[in-house]
Image (cartoon, rainbow, N blue to C red):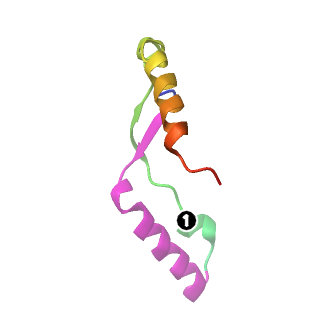
């Protein structure tokens, strides 16, 4: 709720593209600065401070309830 979300163009293929780029570096070599270029930003979602404060009580209740059902390591 309190984190800015940044969406990248082509982000839906991000993990596969990252794996392909790592494979290319491992097989062909090359300059990581040229191969591992970040895609452009598609759009950003900024948290709404009014919603953050309005939902703070519900967030606290959820965290308390969740901690009761989460296994302890």
x and y, in percent, of residue 62 in the image = 46, 29
> What's the residue at 51%, 55% (across, down)?
38
> What's the residue at 58%, 79% (across, down)?
25
Q: Residue furthest bottom?
A: 27
Q: In what quadrant of the picture does the C terminus appear?
A: bottom right
Specify start and end residues of the magenta stretch as a single range. 3-29
Mark 1 = which residue?
36
Image quarter for residue 55? top left
In the rendered image of this protein, does residue 20 appear above or below residue 12? below
x and y, in percent, of residue 28 in the image = 56, 87
Depth check, front residue: 20 or 5: 5
Depth check, front residue: 64 or 43: 64
Asked whether residue 45 is drawn in magenta, I would say no
x and y, in percent, of residue 27 in the image = 56, 88
Residue 63 seen: yes
Disc tally is 1
In the rendered image of this protein, does residue 70 appear above or below residue 59? below
Q: Main secondary structure of the magenta part?
A: helix
Asked whether residue 22 is drawn in magenta, I would say yes
Q: Residues within 10 Å of mark 1 (few under 14, many from 20)?
A: few
**23 left or right, relative to 41:** right
> What's the residue at 45%, 54% (across, down)?
39
Label 1: state its secondary structure: loop
In the rendered image of this protein, does residue 12 appear above or below residue 53? below
Residue 52 seen: no
x and y, in percent, of residue 15 in the image = 44, 65
> What's the residue at 36%, 62% (across, down)?
13
């Amino acid at each position: 709720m309190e984190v800015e979300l940044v969406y990248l163009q082509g982000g839906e293929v991000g993990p596969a593209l990252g794996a392909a780029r790592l494979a290319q570096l491992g097989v062909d070599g090359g300059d990581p600065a040229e191969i591992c270029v970040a895609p452009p930003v598609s759009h950003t979602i900024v948290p709404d401070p009014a919603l953050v404060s309005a939902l703070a009580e519900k967030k606290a209740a959820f965290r308390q309830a969740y901690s009761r059902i989460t296994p302890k390591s």
